[in-house]
Image (cartoon, grey):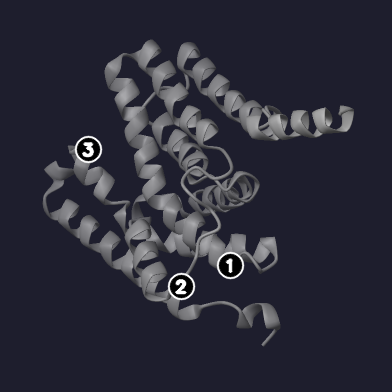
Amino acid sequence: MRPIYRNLHIGAIATFYVIALVLRLITIAVGNRYPILWGNYAFQLSTGLGPIVGALVAMTIFKRKAVYTTCGKSVWKSILTIAVPCLVFGIIGGLDMGFLCLLAFVYGLLEEFGWRGFLQNELRDLPMWQYVLIITAMWFLWHLDLSQRHLLSFFLLLFFASWGIGKVANDTHSLLFCAAFHGIVNFSKRGSLSDPTFLLAFVCVIVFWIVMWYFVNIPKKRNIYRHQDFTRRINI
């Protein structure tokens, strides 16, 4: 076995995935038995509990440390990542649409804490194409309700999502940013991309995120002060 594979903690990964699958199976079974629950927002959120619960249990039992955190490299950027689109969609679609946007991000965080926060973190020493493919396969099977989806297109969607959101995680370490990308896809199903106003807002939100995270860099004040102190001492 190659050295990089020896570093994988199979026990932690297996614990995470079994818990994620079991909780997903339970919620789907309950939803199918009582279809009225699918219209309940709290129940819809519960279908995403598996990854975060599995990750927390595995990290606690096996004492695994996370590289990716809730806010990652920037607290204020992570907060704006969530707040701005909720405000934008709330303005163009009313309070209900703003609330649905927030729920989509919350659901995204429940999943992303597991898929990126834990699983990608555990697989990060593997070549990118390998951990992307592994996460895609596990994420694909976790959904369980595959009979209701077009399998090939759904697998490809998850593959590109695993690559794209995985890159976001590596670049920013922010699970809120990962959750936002995950959530905005789910949220777009609630809105109408054929509506010019909604589509424009959707595109503007994505552009805002990219510009803010990748092109806006405000230096920390304490570093400025240290530089000023150092300059002052030289002058003296």
- Tell whether label 3 touches label 1 (CB within 8 Å): no
Q: Position of residue 204 (x, y in %)?
A: 56, 19
Q: Residue furthest bottom?
A: 1
Q: Is residue 159 above or below residue 60?
A: above
Residue occupying image coordinates x 38% and y 12%: 91
Q: Position of residue 232 (x, y in %)?
A: 81, 28
Which residue lies under the disc numbered 3?
A: 41
Q: Mark 2 belongs to which amino acid?
A: Ile
Q: Mark 1 belongs to which amino acid?
A: Leu
- Tell whether label 3 touches label 2 (CB within 8 Å): no
State the CA–CA distance, disc 1 to disc 3.
32 Å
Q: Of residues 80 and 163, which is closer to you in this image? A: 80
Q: Is residue 87 left or right of residue 121?
A: left
Question: Which comes before the other along the chain, label 1 or label 3?
Answer: 3
Q: Which mark is residue 13?
A: 2
Which residue lies under the disc numbered 1?
A: 123
Q: Secondary structure at mark 1?
A: helix
Residue occupying image coordinates x 56% and y 51%: 156
Q: Which mark is residue 25?
A: none
Q: Residue furthest right?
A: 235
Q: Residue furthest front?
A: 236
Q: Is residue 1 above or below residue 138?
A: below
Q: Nearer the viewer, mark 1 or mark 3?
A: 1
The N terminus, quarter of image: bottom right
State the CA–CA distance, disc 2 to disc 3.
29 Å
Q: Is residue 193 left or right of residue 22?
A: right
Q: Of residues 136 and 227, which is closer to you in this image? A: 227
Q: Secondary structure at mark 3?
A: helix
